[in-house]
Image (cartoon, rainbow, N blue to C red):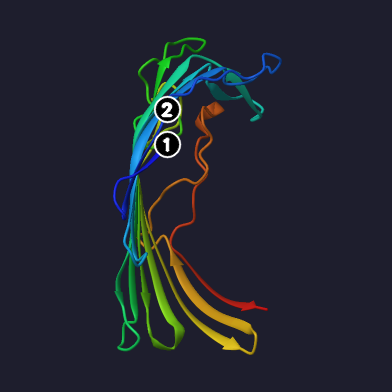
């Protein structure tokens, strides 16, 4: 349901939902409940946008990953999961001009809060009720700034903050929080009907030690897939 409150503001909500999937499936989430509400705000010129929502999901017989000693994964239905959270996204052109050294300045940011926990979940040797949901950070903040210069030069900077991540159901091992800073500068030029772009970028500028694609509930504590430290790229794109 969407409600038009003013010419610029919309409020919306989603009613609670209950559903069952076919009993013939061995692995399936049999029952879930969803409550969600939020609002969207957009300026008349489209230069500023705000989207915010809060939600609560509850899954019965949630699908949980398991890893065997030969490193193959399998999945089981076990217990239930409570998933309350909130999301907010904001984007705005702070400055736009047809002349001057800076022609455009756009700011974007998003925040996700995920207070996910096991509600009723017992493993082979322990009960994990109340433990944080495996593999999900409680907070993620992504912010970026795009700067436009004359002659089609541009600069893009992005920062990603991710809080600690539980790597097993018992919450005895966590991936540490990290700050990922990236930057990319580019130049575009039209050649007839084609578009030429030359760019240079830097990734993990703060030289953070973090993992990409953690292996959850891994055998032998082999949870981590280390990401590259500070690295650089240069490239050329030609659009026909």
Give residue 174's quadrant in the image.
top left
Taking the spot 67% from the left edge, 13% from the top edge, the residue there is 23
Q: Which residue is mark 2?
A: 15
- Residue 13: name its quadrant: top left
Asked if one can make out residue 143 in the rendered structure from this viewpoint, the answer is: yes
Q: Nearer the viewer, residue 24 or 175?
A: 24
Category of crowding for the residue at label 2, using alpha-carbon neighbours closer than 10 angstroms: few (below 14), some (14–19), many (at least 20): few
- Cα separation, mark 1 vs mark 2, equals 8 Å
- x and y percentages locating residue 119 in the rendered image: 40, 16
Seen in the image, is 16 located left or right of residue 213? left
Q: Residue at x 52, y 20 (%)?
A: 62
Residue occupying the point 50% across, 39% down:
214
- Quarter of the picture containing the C terminus is bottom right
Q: What residue sits 66% from the left and 29% below the top?
A: 72
Relative to 63, is 112 above or below?
Answer: below
- Give the percent coordinates (x, y) of residue 130: 35, 18
132 shown above or below 123? below
Q: Are marks 1 and 2 in contact (CB under 8 Å)?
A: yes
User: Which disc, if any, is residue 21?
Assistant: none
Q: SS for tag 1?
A: loop
* Residue 1 disc label: 1
Residue 178 appearing in the image: no
Badge 1: residue crowd in 10 Å (few <14, some 14–19, many ≥20): few
């Amino acid at each position: 349901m969407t409600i038009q409150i003013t010419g610029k503001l919309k409020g919306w909500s989603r009613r609670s939902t209950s559903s069952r999937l076919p009993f013939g499936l061995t692995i399936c989430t049999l029952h879930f409940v969803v409550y969600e509400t939020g609002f969207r705000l957009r300026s008349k010129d489209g230069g500023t946008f705000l989207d915010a929502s809060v939600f609560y999901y509850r899954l019965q017989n949630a699908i949980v990953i398991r890893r065997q000693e030969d490193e193959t994964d399998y999945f089981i239905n076990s217990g239930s999961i409570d998933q309350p959270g909130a999301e907010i996204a904001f984007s705005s052109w702070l400055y736009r001009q047809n002349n001057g050294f800076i022609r455009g300045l756009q700011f974007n940011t998003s925040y996700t809060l995920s207070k996910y926990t096991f509600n009723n979940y017992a493993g082979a040797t322990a009960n994990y009720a109340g433990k944080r949901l495996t593999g999900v950070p409680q907070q993620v903040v992504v912010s970026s700034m795009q700067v436009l210069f004359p002659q089609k030069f541009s600069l893009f900077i992005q920062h990603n903050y991710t809080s600690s991540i539980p790597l097993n159901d018992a919450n005895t091992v966590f991936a540490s929080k990290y700050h990922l800073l990236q930057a990319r500068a580019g130049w575009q030029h039209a050649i007839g009907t084609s578009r030429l772009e030359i760019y240079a970028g830097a990734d993990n500028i703060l030289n953070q030690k973090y993992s990409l694609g953690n292996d959850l509930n891994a055998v032998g504590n082999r949870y981590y897939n280390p990401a590259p430290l500070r690295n650089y790229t240069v490239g050329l794109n030609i659009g026909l």
